[in-house]
Image: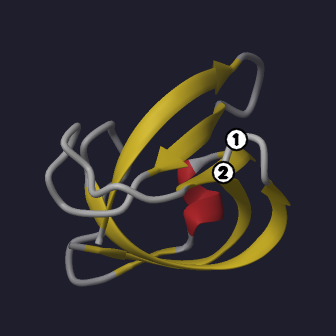
Amino acid sequence: MFPLYLVRLWHGPPVHYDFLLRPGGKGPNATAGPAFKYEDANAFDLRLTGKKVPATVSAGDRFRFVAKVAEFNADQYLFLLDPVSTEVR
């Protein structure tokens, strides 16, 4: 499980964000480990699935992510991801 953090809002239509994903389910008290990031994405790009798919996503929402690794930044210990599917928890 990974809590979702919105780290940057891109301006201009359509609205899109950088999403930072941290391991664990304790919000700001995330488990130690690497960070994962979706860059320049909107809620539609996350390919939300589940029984109660929200119209929007917010910081602190919890999901299970399936993604492809697009790039790894060893200096930041950051995986840049391409979303495959996102299950609402």
The image's colouring method is secondary structure
Judging depth in this view, the residue of 12 and 23 nearest the camera is 23
Q: Quadrant of the N terminus?
A: bottom left
> On residue 77, which mark appears?
2
Q: Quadrant of residue 5?
A: top left
- Circles 1 and 2 in contact, beta carbons < 8 Å: yes
Asked whether, in this view, residue 75 is left or right of residue 50, the answer is: right
Which amino acid type corresponds to the residue marked 2 in the rendered image?
Tyr
The correct choice, above or below, for 58 with respect to 52 in the image is: above
Instruction: Residue at 67%, 51% (x, y): give it.
Output: 78
Residue 14 rendering spot, x and y as whole percentages = 72, 34
Residue 36 rendering spot, x and y as whole percentages = 58, 56
Badge 2 density bin: few <14, some 14–19, many ≥20, Cα 10 Å: few
Instruction: Residue at 70%, 41% (x, y): give it.
Output: 76
> On residue 76, which mark appears?
1
Residue 79 rendering spot, x and y as whole percentages = 69, 59
The correct choice, above or below, for 87 with respect to 39 in the image is: below
